[in-house]
Amino acid sequence: MKELTKPEEFLKSKPYWTTKEARELIGEEFQVDFSEAQVRRILKEKLKMNFSKPYSLNYRRPSEAEEILAGNLNTVMSLLKEKGMIS
């Protein structure tokens, strides 16, 4: 499969894919039938894509979570300096 730039463009249209979804997309677009193992190999070795486990986002996380964390960290660092635990 020499023309790997076209499948790569298709696959980059979505931030993540399951192997099954990628296999179906490749089959539909290029009329080929690869096994899931072949698709994994193509994605990893030819297209340099990575495997990762999807994680769910916490819907309760406040939108300003990073700012809250930075503020808390500054407070803790100040308290540690006051107590002489860090310099």
Image (tube, rainbow, N blue to C red):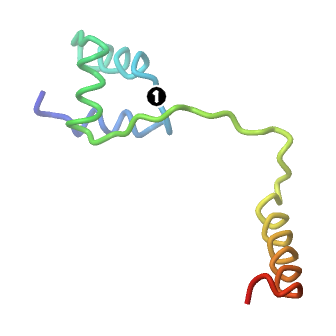
What residue do we see at 81% from left, 67% from top? 67
In this rendering, position of residue 70 left or right of residue 23 = right
Does 28 sit above or below residue 64?
A: above
Res 7 quadrant in image: top left
**Three-letter amino acid code at disc 1?**
Trp
What residue do we see at 46% from left, 28% from top? 17
What residue does disc 1 label? 17
In this rendering, position of residue 18 left or right of residue 3 = right
What residue do we see at 86% from left, 69% from top? 72
Does 53 sit above or below residue 23?
A: below
- The residue closer to the viewer here, 76 or 67, is 76
- The residue closer to the viewer here, 67 or 2, is 67
Residue 78 x, y percent position in the rendering: 85, 83
What residue do we see at 30% from left, 37% from top? 8
Res 26 quadrant in image: top left
- The residue closer to the viewer here, 6 or 71, is 71
Q: Quadrant of the N terminus?
A: top left
Does 22 sit above or below residue 56?
A: above
Residue 73 x, y percent position in the rendering: 80, 71
Q: Residues within 10 Å of mark 1 (few under 14, many from 20)?
A: some
